[in-house]
Amino acid sequence: MSRRFGRIPLPLIPVRCQFSPALSLSISNNRNPLGGVHGSSTRTLSMSGARLLKHADYQRVYAASRKRQSASMSWFLAPQSEPVPKPICGLIPGPRVGLTAGKVLGKAHERNRIKRRMRDILRRHVDLLPVGFDLVLHPRRSVLTAEFSKLEAEVVRILGQANAEAARIAQPAAPKPIV
C-alpha cells in the first residue's frame, strides 16, 4: 500500500491585529536609491491605509471635482463623503490617494514602473496629503523618463496646491457685503 504525500492542510488560527507601540514607524527622507534607510532602523510609513481601493471611490472623486493639469500629470481632489473608518490593525485614518495608469501609458512593465515611482514619492510625502480629502493622480507617459528629483518636486507642488484647494473648499463661504 503506497502512502500519498502532499500538502497537509494547516488549521486556521485567528490572528488579532493590534498596533504595537514597540513598532517604530517614521517618515524618512534620507533613503538610498536601493530602498534602505541610511543610519536608521526605522521603517518608512506604508501607503496601505492611505490608498483609494474601490472603483466607486474613484468615480465619486471624478464626479465631485474638476480636472486639474500639471506638467506631467493631471489630478482630481474631492472631499471624503463618508467618515473614514476607525483605525483597523493600527492604520491611521485620514487622507487617501489613488493612482491610475491606463494602457495608453504603455506596456504592463512600463505602467508598473510609473506606479512604483509615484508610490515611492507619495510614500515619502504622505504627511502632505490634504486631510479629509481624496486625491487621484493620472500620470502621463513622461513620468516614465522624467528625472526622479524633478518628478518628486512636481508631486510636492501638486500636494501643496491640493492642500490650498482643500483649505478653500473646507472654509465656509463668506457672505457678500451689501452695498
Image (cartoon, helix red, strand yellow):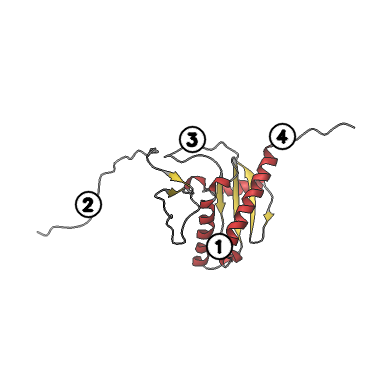
**Mark 3, mark 2: which one is toward the viewer?**
3
Q: Residue at x 54, y 52 (%)?
A: 122
Looking at numbered disc 4 in the image, what kind of residue is underneath it? Pro
Q: CA distance from mark 4 to mark 2?
A: 62 Å
Q: CA distance from mark 3 to mark 4?
A: 27 Å
Q: Residue 148 got which mark?
A: 1
State the residue position of label 2: 8
Q: Position of residue 103 (x, y in %)?
A: 56, 64
**Mark 4, mark 2: which one is toward the viewer?**
4
Q: Residue 86 got which mark?
A: 3
Q: Secondary structure at mark 4?
A: loop
Q: CA distance from mark 2 to mark 1?
A: 47 Å
| Of callouts 3 and 4, the N-terminal one | 3
Between 71 and 22, the one nearer to me in the picture: 22
State the residue position of label 4: 172
Q: Residue at x 65, y 48 (%)?
A: 162
How many marks can you see? 4
Q: CA distance from mark 1 to mark 3?
A: 35 Å
Q: CA distance from mark 4 to mark 1?
A: 38 Å
| Of callouts 4 and 2, the N-terminal one | 2
Residue 15 drawn above or below residue 72: above
Q: Secondary structure at mark 1?
A: helix
**Mark 4, mark 1: which one is toward the viewer?**
1
Left/right of residue 52 with respect to residue 12 in the rendered view? right
Q: Is residue 73 something that shows in the picture?
A: yes
Looking at numbered disc 2 in the image, what kind of residue is underneath it? Ile
CB atoms at circles 2 and 1 under 8 Å apart? no
Q: Secondary structure at mark 3?
A: loop
Residue 79 lies in what quarter of the image? top right
Q: Locate the C terminus and report the quarter of the image it occupies.
A: top right
| Of callouts 3 and 2, the N-terminal one | 2
| Of callouts 2 and 1, the N-terminal one | 2
